[in-house]
Amino acid sequence: MGDSLFDNGNNNLLVTAAKANYPPYGIDYPHGPTGRFSNGRNIADFLGEFLGFDKPISPFVTAKGSKILKGVNYASGGAGILDDSGSRQGDRFSLNRQLQNHRTTILRLALLLGSMDQVKEHLRKCLYTINIGNNDYLNNYYLPQFYSTSRLYTQQQFADLLIRKYSQQLRTLYNYEARKIAIFGIGLIGCVPSVLAMYPPANGSTCVDSINGAVQLFNNMLKTLVDDLNNELPNAKFIYINITSISSGDPSALGIKVANASCCIVSTTIAKGQCAPGKVPCSNRSEYIFYDDIHPVEIFNELTAARAYNATSPTDSYPIDIRRLLMEMVDVLNRDLAAAKFTYVNTDFKKRSFE
């Protein structure tokens, strides 16, 4: 679930400017433009590969029949925790709508598996990943000409509002039998090119520190929320993925030479900050962080997913990373379902699977 960082095609048929089903998006993806907001694979794609899936998880709008047994991607470009976030761009599946879509999937699973008891057992074995909140800031709070939230709430009050709403939504997901949930925090959105263009940094900084500070209020509370949910909800295991930690550091150490500009030529008419249709992007894409003015290139998505999956710093995830969460899932399944065989395979990010 989530926004354009995870979206793999759910917005293609919506009436919205927030879609990426045209060139030069997908220039490095095997099937060309698919709705992914990048030159290639996104974070969700790489996580699926690390889990051992040989094909991408299907977007909700095209997931049919037995495909849903392997997973569904509900993410939607422009989506937020608040229903109104991203509305200026057009239609989108907000997080509340994504939860409704998940409910539809549950009913479809009942037809495939034969009973709700089987569905509950199936869902409790699944891993859920959520990347949401970016648009509540980028396409709500920091667009005062279109939204009133920055006049109604201080930064702290807005973070409080988001966490209250998010807490309710995560509890709804739990009530839908989700038990293992990885929650991605918001990254350094004060460093993305679209924000730098609107709010030029001050005091010699390369980023808009005030925006990063506002987002950090949310992230700090999100980490606390993870503890609260784990303490309050039986058999739940929520983890927090610290995108700020993962994306911090010296970009040049990763071979990145351009950290504050887009690889593609951005549009000024269709969707501000997204790639202009049909324009040729830069050829040295692995040397950029951003493909357009908002979204990362494939190589940066891979690096982000890799550290979310297998943390290289204690601050990358809390209390554990996705890899460890999966290992705990296997331990529980081996203990509680002795008649079944569950194995965890780790071959340096090449294949992870349940058998």
Image: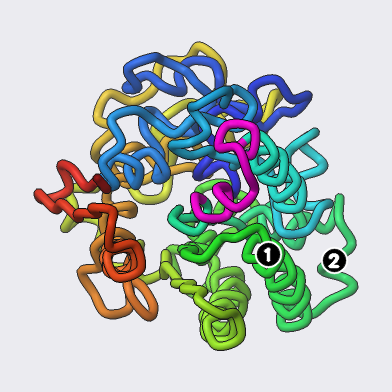
Which sits in the foreground, 200 or 192?
A: 192
Looking at the image, is mark 1 or mark 2 earlier in the sequence?
A: 2
Residue 62 seen anywhere in this rendered image of the structure: yes
Whether residue 6 is situated above or below residue 30 in the rendered picture: below
Q: Which quarter of the figure has residue 29?
A: top left
Circle 2 sits on which residue? 149
Counting from the top left corner in percent of width and height, residue 327 is at 26, 65
Residue furthest left in the image: 347
Whether residue 171 is situated above or below residue 142 in the rendered picture: below
Which sits in the foreground, 202 or 96?
A: 96
Circle 1 sits on which residue? 175
User: Helix or strand or loop: what does disc 1 sit on?
Assistant: helix
Which sits in the foreground, 341 or 49?
A: 341
| Callout 2 amino acid | Thr
- Which portion, as a residue range, is magenta? 109-122
Report whether 85 appears left or right of 196: right
Q: Does the magenta stretch include residue 119?
A: yes
Whether residue 114 is situated above or below residue 257 in the rendered picture: above
Quadrant occupied by the C terminus: top left
Q: Is residue 15 magenta?
A: no
Q: Which colour scheme is used?
A: rainbow
Give the class, few, some or many, for how many residues have Cα within 10 Å of label 1's Cα (few <14, many ≥20).
few
Counting from the top left corner in percent of width and height, residue 283 is at 27, 23
Counting from the top left corner in percent of width and height, residue 30 is at 32, 17
Residue furthest top in the image: 278
Whether residue 185 is situated above or below residue 30 in the rendered picture: below
